[in-house]
Amino acid sequence: MSHLPFKNYMEDAVEHMLNRLAPEYPEACMCDRCRTDMMMIALNNLPPRYVSTHKGDVLQRAMGMELQYEVEILTEVMRAIRIVSGQPHHGRNEEGL
Ligand SMILES: [Zn+2]
């Protein structure tokens, strides 16, 4: 049997939230490596939410989910930014606590 296409909505939501929060953490490194670490930490702490990517009803459903889970996503992304920016793991000179 086949199935319709779907994906984990949280991946987009976390990336979107990270882009939104990044300007508020000017001291945090936002290179590709650190951003990836932040996204993985946040995603590991958030339950996956799979949505169908079939047809045009995805956007509306995703927007509803964004409101529903916004606080959770915000909390986990903020936590991930603090964790990663507190771990100088690729040759940064200054270590913030
Ligand atoms: Zn970095």
Image (tube, helix red, strand yellow):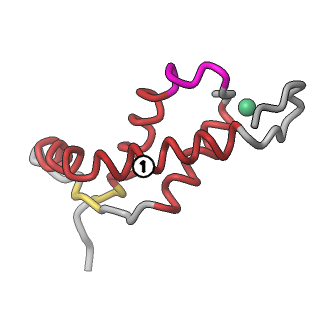
- Residue 5 is a magenta residue: no
- The outermost residue toward the bottom is 1
Q: Is residue 87 left or right of residue 30?
A: right
Tell me which residue sits at (22%, 58%) in the image.
52
Tell me which residue sits at (57%, 46%) in the image.
80
Q: Position of residue 90 (x, y in %)?
A: 85, 36
Q: Is residue 11 left or right of residue 52?
A: right
Q: Is residue 37 left or right of residue 63?
A: right
Q: Which quadrant: the N terminus?
A: bottom left
The residue to which callout 1 is attached is 11
Q: Is residue 39 above or below residue 85?
A: below
Task: Give the magenta-colored segment's residue range.
Answer: 22-27
Tell me which residue sits at (59%, 44%) in the image.
38
Q: Name the foreground residue: 24 vs 90.
A: 24
Q: Is residue 2 above or below residue 78?
A: below
- Residue 25 is a magenta residue: yes
Q: Position of residue 3 (x, y in %)?
A: 24, 70
Secondary structure of the residue carrying tag 1 is helix
Tell me which residue sits at (58%, 54%) in the image.
41
**Would you say the beta carbon of the disc 1 residue lies within 8 angstroms of ligand 1?**
no
Q: Which quadrant of the view contains residue 13?
A: top left
Q: Name the foreground residue: 16 vs 88.
A: 88
Amino acid tagged 1: Glu
Q: Position of residue 57 (x, y in %)?
A: 10, 47
Q: Within 10 Å of the Cα at label 1, are there few (<14), some (14-19), or many (20+) other Cα atoms?
A: some
